[in-house]
């Protein structure tokens, strides 16, 4: 039966393009992944933002990245209270079962979640899910200070980057992450993507500064 069922036409079109271009070149890879399971080396914690797809930015093939996306790429601190915690569950699976070697927290410019928090906008619903979730960035706000008068662009950039640093700190509150990181078997990284220019920056853990990644491919040999 033709599975139209009012499914978005753009997605069916995209799927046909996938069948015509990507699947033929990656069929063996998909089959191997199906038979042997996934073994990604890197977990990415990214934002839901439709402009910041980790698989696109890092040109990743199927099976390469284990991705968790949520509003503003946040990780709540370790809280073993029995509540249903999506990020904690994914983190536990990535670290304990898949044994990823890297966790990348990928922040980005013009993050709607960060902006919403800064502007203290009215809750979208009585539950105020975004407001409650974004309260996680309060420690980052405490570090960069209150928003200045006038243009917020530069301030928001600093807050977005400070939030990545804070999230890396929250990751270390998970015993499974801390133990493996201290043993050198798991590395935590911060990164920041500028939506307008496509520029990626990575965090220097020692200085706490983000450095832009060279855009030209270094020649080898
Ligand atoms: Zn965002």
Image (cartoon, helix red, strand yellow):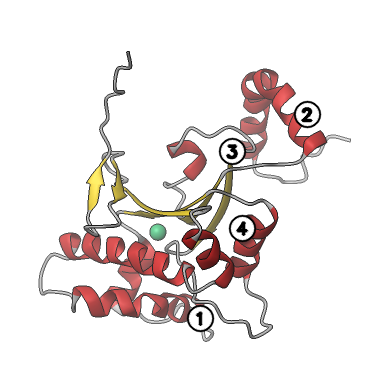
Residue 118 occupies quadrant: bottom left
| Mark-to-mark CA distance, 2 and 3 | 14 Å
Mark sitting earlier along the chain (4/2): 2
| Mark-to-mark CA distance, 4 and 1 | 35 Å
Q: Nearer the viewer, residue 178 or 219?
A: 178
Disc 4 secondary structure class? helix
The image quadrant where one finds the C terminus is top left
Q: Residues within 10 Å of mark 3 (few under 14, many from 20)?
A: some
Mark sitting earlier along the chain (1/3): 3
Q: Going by the image, does 36 lie left or right of 106?
A: right
Q: Residues within 10 Å of mark 1 (few under 14, many from 20)?
A: few
Q: Nearer the viewer, residue 120 or 177?
A: 177
Tell me the residue at 31%/47% (across/down): 202
Mark sitting earlier along the chain (4/3): 3
Q: Residue furthest right?
A: 1
Count numbered badges in the picture.
Answer: 4
| Mark-to-mark CA distance, 4 and 3 | 15 Å
Kindly report which numbered mark, 4 or 1, lies closer to the viewer in this rendering: 4
- Contact check, label 4 and label 3, Cβ < 8 Å: no
Mark sitting earlier along the chain (2/1): 2
Provide the residue designation for mark 2. Answer: 31
Provide the residue designation for mark 3. Answer: 64
- Label of residue 125 in the image: 1
Q: Nearer the viewer, residue 191 or 51?
A: 191
| Mark-to-mark CA distance, 2 and 1 | 44 Å
Provide the residue designation for mark 4. Answer: 95
Tell me the residue at 37%/81% (across/down): 122
- Contact check, label 4 and label 1, Cβ < 8 Å: no
Kindly report which numbered mark, 1 or 3, lies closer to the viewer in this rendering: 3
Mark sitting earlier along the chain (2/3): 2
């Amino acid at each position: 039966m033709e599975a139209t069922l009012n499914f978005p036409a753009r997605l069916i079109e995209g799927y046909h393009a996938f069948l015509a271009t990507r699947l033929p070149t990656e069929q063996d890879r998909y089959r191997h992944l199906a038979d042997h399971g996934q073994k990604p080396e890197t977990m990415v914690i990214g934002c839901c933002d439709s402009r910041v797809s980790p698989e696109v930015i890092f040109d990743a093939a199927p099976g390469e990245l284990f991705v968790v996306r949520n509003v503003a790429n946040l990780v709540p601190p370790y809280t073993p209270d029995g509540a249903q915690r999506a990020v904690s569950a994914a983190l536990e699976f990535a670290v304990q079962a898949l044994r990823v070697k890297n966790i990348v927290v990928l922040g980005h410019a013009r993050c709607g979640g960060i902006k919403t928090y800064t502007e203290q906008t009215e809750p979208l619903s009585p539950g105020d899910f975004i407001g409650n979730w974004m309260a996680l960035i309060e420690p980052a706000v405490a570090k960069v200070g209150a928003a200045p008068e006038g243009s917020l662009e530069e301030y928001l950039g600093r807050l977005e980057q400070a939030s990545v640093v804070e999230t890396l700190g929250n990751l270390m509150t998970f015993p499974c992450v801390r133990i493996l990181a201290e043993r050198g078997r798991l590395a935590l990284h911060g990164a920041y993507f500028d939506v307008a220019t496509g520029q990626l920056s990575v965090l220097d853990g020692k200085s706490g500064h983000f450095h832009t990644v060279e855009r030209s491919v270094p020649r080898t040999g």
